[in-house]
Image: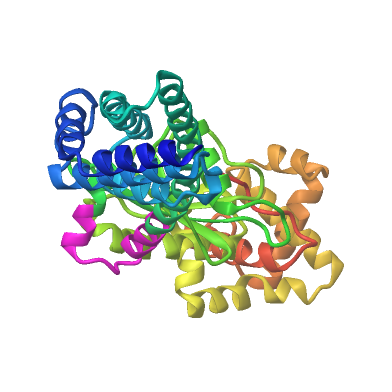
Amino acid sequence: MDSAGDHRLRALLADLESDAAILEDTVAELRATIPGYEDIPAESVRASARRNLDLSIRTLRDGRAPDAEQIEEPRTLMEERMRQGVSIVSVLAGFRLSMSVILRHLLDLAPRHGVPPERALDFSTLLWALGDAFTTQAVVVHRDRSIAQAVADSARRTHWIRDAVIGGLDRTALLAGAGTYDLPLDRPVRAVRATAPAGEGGDPAEKLQQWAERAGVRLLTAPRGEGAVGILMDDVGRAAPEPGLTIALGSAGHLTQVGESFTVATRVLEAAHRVGWTGVVDVDALSWRMGIQSSPETTRLLLDKHVAPVVEEGPFGELVLEALGAYLDHGLNIPNAAASIPVHVNTLRYRLKRYRELTGGNVQDVETLIEASWALTAHRVSSPATKGPPRL
C-alpha cells in the first residue's frame, strides 16, 4: 500500500474506532433479535461489542486475520455468556451480528476516505476470516468449559448425595439439593448402600445405577469408599442386580429423614454380609437375621449351643448340620429336605436324631427351630464346607 493509501486506511480506522453508533446499534439489535440476549445488561453487550470492534481494527491494520489460538476475545465472551446462561448458538449468532454491524459502518465510511471498492471488498474478506477464526476458538472454549463444568457438576452432585445420606446437610441445603436434583418432597424416599464382591471389576455406583434402570426406578447414586450410596425415589422393581452385588435398602421416609434411613441401610448391609446374602435386601427380608450382626452375644450363645457340639464330631458333624439346614430350608418337610441334599429319608432322620443327641435340641420344638435357624445361618457363612443360605 502506498503512503496515500496508508494514510486513508489510518483515517478510516480512526473514524471507525470513534463511531459510537456501532456500539449502540449492536446493543439494540442483539437484545431485540438474538434469543438469550434480551435479559443481558446493556453494558455487558456494549463491552463485548467494543472488544469486537477493537479486534476488527487490529485485523484491518495488520492486513491479515489472526490464527484462532491467538485470539483471547472468544474466551472472555464465552465465559461471560455461559455464566449468564446464553447458549453457544446465540453467542455465535450474536458475534456474527456484531461483525455485520461493524462491516456495515466500515463500508459506509470507506467512500468518505477515498477507499476504492476493491479495497473495501478486501476489508470484508478480512473480517469474515476473522469471524471464522473467532468462531473456531469460541467452540473450543465452549467445549473445554462444558467438560470442566460437567466434571464440577458431577463432583457437586456426588458430594451432595454423600452428605445428604450420612446426615451431613442442614434442612436448607437438603431442600435446595432436592430442587436441583428433582427429588420428591411429597412421597417417601430410601437411602441405599451397595457393595460388590472384593476383587471384581466395575464401579459399584455404576452397577447400582444399571440395576435401577433395569428395575425402572429413579435413583441418585454416588461412590463411597469401595461401595456406593444412593437415594431411591420409587418402590423397588423386580429386576435383580448382577450376581454378587448387595443392595441394602434403608427405611422409607421423608427426604429430611434420609440420614436415619442411611443408618438402617448400613445395618442391613452389615447383616446381609454377616449371613452371606446378596441381591436386594431390607429389614423385612432379613427379619430375625438382623439380630445375628446386631446381637453378637446372642449369636455366640446359640452357636455354642446348637453348632459347636456338632462340629466337634468332625466331618460327620458337618453332615448333621447339612441335614438340619435342609430340614429348615424346606419347611420341615423330610422327603423334600432329603431329596435336596440328596440322601435317603431314613438317613436324614438319623442325622436329625444325632443332632438332638448332641445338642439336646428338639427339631419339633418352636424355640429350638428359631435358635437353630439363627445359629446355623451364622455358621454357614464362616464354614465353606456347608451349604450356603438361600439368596434373595
Q: Nearer the viewer, residue 166 or 122?
A: 122
Q: Residue at x 41, y 50 (%)?
A: 75
Provide residue 216's location: percent of width, then percent of height. 44, 30
Considering only vertical position in the picture, is 124 above or below 73?
A: above
Provide residue 267's location: percent of width, then percent of height. 44, 65
Please indicate whether residue 300 sits to the left or right of residue 121 in the image. Answer: right
Provide residue 76's location: percent of width, then percent of height. 36, 51
The region drawn magenta spans: 157-176
Hey, which residue is sitting farthest right in the picture?
A: 315
Q: Residue at x 54, y 58 (%)?
A: 369
Considering only vertical position in the picture, is 262 above or below 190?
A: below
Q: Quadrant of residue 302?
A: bottom right
Provide residue 24's location: percent of width, then percent of height. 14, 36
Please indicate whether residue 239 sits to the left or right of residue 17 in the image. Answer: right
Q: Residue at x 38, y 58 (%)?
A: 156
Q: Nearer the viewer, residue 57 or 322?
A: 57
Task: Find out whether residue 54 is within the magenta segment.
Answer: no
Considering only vertical position in the picture, is 97 above or below 279?
A: above
Q: Is residue 183 visible?
A: no
Q: What colour scheme does the image use?
A: rainbow
Please indicate whether residue 180 sits to the left or right of residue 348 in the image. Answer: left
Task: Find out whether residue 169 is within the magenta segment.
Answer: yes
The image shows a total of numbered marks equal to: 0
Q: Nearer the viewer, residue 320 or 62?
A: 62
Considering only vertical position in the picture, is 106 above or below 176?
A: above
Please indicate whether residue 275 sits to the left or right of residue 345 in the image. Answer: left
Quadrant in the picture for the C terminus: top right
Q: Residue at x 74, y 66 (%)?
A: 383
- Magenta region, mostly helix, strand or loop? helix
Q: Is residue 32 visible?
A: yes
